[in-house]
Image (cartoon, rainbow, N blue to C red):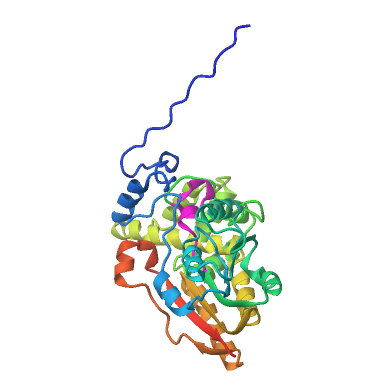
């Protein structure tokens, strides 16, 4: 039998500045190799695929006042943009611990930061949920500064295999760690209409929660499974078909955003995890320690604001942010994903 050579497969051609298909954006997915392409994409007020543009960086650094020799925590590593800036402030002295539940992105970010010269002597990355930070704090002796960026990273949103965006076809997953828990598709298969409507209202203030939940449950009862992002988007669009035609497109877009948010919060137990994190914060901060939190929707911000006020009354925080800090108009113009951001902070009592 003749030996058959495996035919050479050509790499998919890079189609223009912004190819539609995520996997075709190989230049954007390799920022170190194609810096010029990355710069062009950012100049057009877009976030390159596989990358995340950190928000409120200067505001965070101004507040945290990271000093060489301190011990800190980045509770949500993500792409590591904030982490890198805090590491620079340490100037090779002290230590920064970073947490992330996403094994895929955590590995990529760790590799990138190691390549920048941040070894294990200055940076330790832990694959764990930030609600477990007390385990790290116990060994570290507490933290002088803590940052928690509660937003979903652009790498997760843009990757269709993760199912975070209604704009691209992919499995309806929405888990931060795909190795644990159940997907959003499975969650929808085991929920009734009343519970789903309650989830949409509680997690996203969805005004059409009743109509959307009715359509989703009705479809599934008729055997029309909702297992992809497109199938969920189509169900939402159908649920809002009663609206005047001129209003339907924009209403469907916003309801898709809110529905995906509500499901993501639910499958990742985000409120429960955030509540636990906020409860543990005072005990992991050293006297005078500082914490900054970035939130991206009203539910998160309410929890943070309430917790800070409560612990200030208890005497555990000496100062808290009276008003949320917002990104500058210039930053929002450069990065559209910054528009919903609020930053709150607190200082541990001495």
Residue in front for this viewpoint, 217 or 259: 259
Residue 154 occupies quadrant: bottom left
Residue depicted at 41% across the width and 67% down the height: 55
- What is the x, y in percent for residue 313? 58, 93
Question: Is residue 328 found left or right of 163 in the rendered image?
Answer: left
Q: Is residue 281 magenta?
A: no
Q: From which residue to which does the magenta span run? A: 149-166
Residue 56 visible (yes or no)? no
User: Is residue 282 shown above or below 261?
Assistant: below
- What is the x, y in percent for residue 37? 34, 46
Residue in front for this viewpoint, 121 or 213: 121
- What is the x, y in percent for residue 142? 65, 77
Residue 58 visible (yes or no)? yes
Residue in front for this viewpoint, 212 or 233: 233
Q: Residue furthest top?
A: 1
User: Is residue 90 shown above or below 5?
Assistant: below
Q: Residue furthest front?
A: 92
Q: Is residue 165 magenta?
A: yes
Quarter of the figure with the C terminus? bottom right
Number of numbered discs present? 0
User: Is residue 30 shown above or below 248?
Assistant: above
Quarter of the figure with the N terminus? top right
Question: Is residue 50 found left or right of 146 in the rendered image?
Answer: left
Residue in front for this viewpoint, 90 or 136: 90
- What is the x, y in percent for residue 65? 47, 78
Residue 191 occupies quadrant: bottom right
């Amino acid at each position: 039998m003749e030996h058959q050579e495996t035919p050479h497969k050509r790499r998919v051609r890079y189609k223009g500045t912004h190819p539609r298909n995520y996997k075709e954006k190989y230049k954007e997915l390799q920022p170190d190799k194609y810096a010029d392409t990355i710069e062009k994409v950012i100049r057009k007020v877009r976030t390159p695929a596989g990358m995340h543009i950190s928000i409120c960086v200067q505001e965070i650094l101004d507040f945290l006042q990271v000093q060489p020799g301190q011990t800190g925590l980045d509770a949500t590593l993500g792409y590591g943009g904030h982490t890198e800036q805090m590491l620079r402030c340490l100037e090779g002295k002290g230590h920064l611990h970073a947490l992330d539940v996403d094994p895929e992105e955590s590995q990529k970010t760790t590799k990138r930061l190691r390549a920048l010269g941040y070894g294990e002597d200055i940076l330790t990355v832990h694959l764990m949920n930030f609600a477990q930070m007390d385990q790290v704090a116990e060994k570290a002796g507490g933290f002088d500064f803590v940052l928690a960026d509660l937003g979903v990273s652009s790498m997760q949103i843009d990757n269709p295999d993760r199912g975070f965006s209604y704009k691209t076809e992919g499995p309806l997953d929405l888990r931060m760690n795909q190795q644990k828990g159940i997907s959003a598709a499975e969650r929808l298969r085991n929920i009734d209409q009343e519970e789903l409507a309650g989830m949409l209202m509680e997690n996203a203030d969805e005004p059409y929660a009743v109509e959307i939940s009715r359509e989703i449950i009705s479809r599934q009862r008729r055997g029309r499974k909702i297992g992809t992002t497109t199938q969920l988007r189509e169900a939402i669009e159908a649920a809002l078909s009663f609206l005047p035609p001129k209003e339907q497109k924009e209403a469907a877009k916003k309801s898709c955003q809110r529905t995906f948010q509500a499901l993501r919060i639910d499958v990742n137990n985000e409120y429960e995890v955030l509540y636990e994190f906020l409860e543990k914060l005072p005990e992991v901060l050293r006297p005078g320690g500082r914490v900054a939190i970035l939130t991206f929707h009203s539910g998160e911000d309410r929890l943070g604001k309430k917790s800070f006020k409560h612990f200030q009354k208890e005497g555990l925080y000496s100062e808290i942010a009276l008003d949320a800090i917002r990104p500058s108009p210039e930053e929002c113009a450069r990065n559209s994903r910054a528009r919903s951001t609020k930053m709150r902070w607190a200082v541990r009592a001495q």
